[in-house]
Structure formats: structure tokens, C-alpha cells
Amino acid sequence: MGCGPVSADNLSGMATRRTKAKSPESWLLLIYKVPSESSRARVAVWRDLKRLGGFYVQQAVCVLPDRDELRAGMEKVRERVTELGGSSVFLTLTDLDDDAREQFVEGFRVQSAKEYAEIVEECETKFVKEIEFERFRENYTFEEAEEIRQDLEKLRRWLAKVEDRDWMDADGKELARAKVADCERLLEEFEADVYERTEGTV
């Protein structure tokens, strides 16, 4: 009996219910192989593991902190690998030397820091510019404000997911939060101007 695809919501939930550890005592390592002719299968497994916050040591070798919810998540990914016609080995790593442990911790931190940087870039180069452009062309409409608010909600959800899988407390979190807050302030100001121009004089 197949388990079906692993949904983004399920994986996100598994990553939510935990207390973050700076340097775990043990780690979960998944080594897998899927049919080489199926790029969709490779991408599907990669996507599921990245949604859990997995760090790739090398191709098809992924590590996560040893936590019950992440173990359950990896088991689901293993089931999917099997369904896709592949194979896998699931190990618990203990007694790592300091160099290996630091490699894992730093890998997770760099990975999450890049995600925070992407959010900052999205705020600065797209969201802010969009409001500036709409002001430039004086497009003060409710419809435009609603469209921009949807973009803000996407940024909030994105930030929440990145924070949720930031296992090693990476740099960049506070800056990303600040940029999203700036976006919210800019939108509120834009919405106020929309109201004044469309309803405020009635």
C-alpha cells in the first residue's frame, strides 16, 4: 500500500513541532538512489528533504538533526523513494568528531542564511519597487492594494517556513524580519493613500 506524495503542509508541520538545538548529539543521515532516467523523481525527493530543512552533504546524501518529528519526516521520504523505484539507507550518526559536527552545523547555518538573504532581496528589489511604481503612475486603487497585500502574505509565509527549518539559528533572521515589517508599513501607507483618494472625499 503506497503512502502517496508527501505534502508541503505535512513536511512543514513536522518541522514546526520542535525545540531548536544548536548542536545535536546525534544526526539523521539519508542516503538514497532513485532511477537515473527519472528527473522528476530526483526533484521530488530533493524538494521533500529541503522542505524539512535537510542539508545535503553531497548528492543524494542528506542530513538532519536527530529529532522525532524529523525522523518521521525522513521515513516518509524513504517510503516515497521506494514508491519511485529507488532504494535508501537511513542511519543515525553519533560520536561525530568536532570537525564533522562543525561541518554540519555550519552547513545548516549557511543554507538558512541564504534563504533569509533571498527574502531580503525579494523585499528590496520587488515589493518596495512595486509600491514605488504604483505611486509613480498614481495607480491608487483597491484592486492594486489587494494584489500587493497578497504579495505581503506570501513574504510572511515564506519567512515563517524559513524560520521553521532554520535548525542552527543562522544569521540574517532579524534583518529578514525587519524587511518584511518595512514592507508591511509601506503597504499600510499605500492603503491609506488609496482610501483618501477613493473614499476619503466622499
Image (cartoon, rainbow, N blue to C red):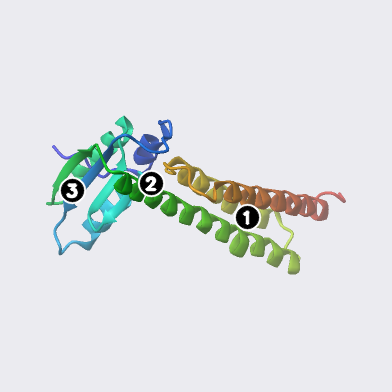
Residue 194 visible here: yes
Q: Position of residue 64 (x, y in %)?
A: 31, 42
User: Which of label 1 and label 3 is nearer to you?
Assistant: 3
Q: Position of residue 170 (x, y in %)?
A: 48, 47
Task: Pick out the residue farthest to the right.
Answer: 201
Q: Earlier in the sequence, mark 2 or mark 3?
A: 3
In the drawing, does residue 104 fall left or right of residue 138? left
- Which labelled disc corresponds to residue 64? none
User: Which of label 2 and label 1 is nearer to you?
Assistant: 2
Circle 2 residue: 105
**Residue placed most toward the observer, 97 or 79:** 97
Per the model, the C-alpha gap separating discs 2 and 3 is 26 Å
In the drawing, does residue 118 fall left or right of residue 184? left
Q: Earlier in the sequence, mark 2 or mark 1?
A: 2
Q: Quadrant of the N terminus?
A: top left
Q: Secondary structure at mark 3?
A: helix
Label 2: few (<14), some (14–19) or many (≥20) C-alpha neighbours in 10 Å: many
Circle 1 residue: 148
- Which labelled disc corresponds to residue 81? 3
Q: Secondary structure at mark 2?
A: helix
At label 2, the amino acid type is Val
Check if mark 2's residue and mark 1's residue have beta carbons within 8 Å. Answer: no
At label 1, the amino acid type is Ile
**Residue placed most toward the observer, 110 or 155:** 110
